[in-house]
């Protein structure tokens, strides 16, 4: 989970929109449409930024979401990979054990387990408490 940071320089009041998705429509419908597909019908995460007219670094406050794909619209000029940065969030929970073997596959499985746990812990600690 995380968010996208964008650097931009455009006229004051111009808006840039970042939409996040886990899938593209072709993966769902097989129709050759490579538009993004909402994460769920009730959750279509996006950020809308208004430019100041100066060199802006745009990132959300109090927002993160899971994503594999993004769509950026309204960007002034040519959008390059240098203007976009994926930022991933996680809790700062100390790893108290580790695993290492001579088998690359086992090491990869363990690394996957650690990343999955980090994602679970992030959801767990960010849930509203009652």
Image: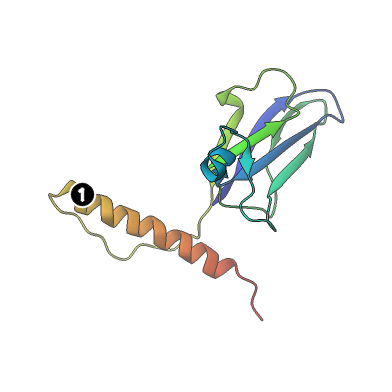
Image quadrant where one finds the C terminus? bottom right
Q: Position of residue 100 (x, y in %)?
A: 19, 54
Outermost residue on the right side: it is 13
Q: Nearer the viewer, residue 5 or 30?
A: 30
Label 1 secondary element: helix
Q: Position of residue 38 (x, y in %)?
A: 64, 48
Please tell me which residue is depicted at 19% across the width and 47% down the height of the picture: 104
Quadrant housing residue 52: top right
Q: Position of residue 53 (x, y in %)?
A: 82, 25
Against 20, is 72 above or below?
Answer: above
Against 115, is 55 above or below?
Answer: above
Q: Nearer the viewer, residue 54 or 21?
A: 21
Q: Residues within 10 Å of mark 1 (few under 14, many from 20)?
A: few
Q: Position of residue 87 (x, y in %)?
A: 55, 43
Please tell me which residue is depicted at 44% across the width and 63% down the height of the picture: 93
What residue is disc 1 on?
105
Please tell me which residue is depicted at 69% across the width and 38% down the height of the picture: 18
Please tell me which residue is depicted at 76% across the width and 28% down the height of the picture: 74
Q: Is residue 40 left or right of residue 121?
A: right
């Amino acid at each position: 989970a995380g968010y996208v940071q964008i650097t931009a320089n455009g006229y004051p009041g111009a808006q840039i929109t970042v939409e996040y998705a886990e899938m593209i429509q072709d993966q769902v419908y097989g129709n050759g449409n490579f538009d993004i597909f909402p994460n769920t019908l009730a959750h279509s995460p996006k950020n809308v930024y208004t430019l100041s007219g100066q060199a802006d670094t745009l990132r959300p406050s109090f927002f993160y979401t899971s994503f594999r794909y993004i769509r950026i619209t309204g960007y002034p000029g040519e959008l390059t990979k240098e203007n976009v940065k994926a930022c991933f969030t996680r809790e700062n929970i100390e790893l108290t054990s580790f695993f290492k073997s001579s088998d690359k596959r086992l090491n990869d499985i363990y690394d996957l387990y650690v990343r999955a746990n980090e994602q679970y812990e992030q959801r767990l600690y960010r849930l509203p408490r009652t």
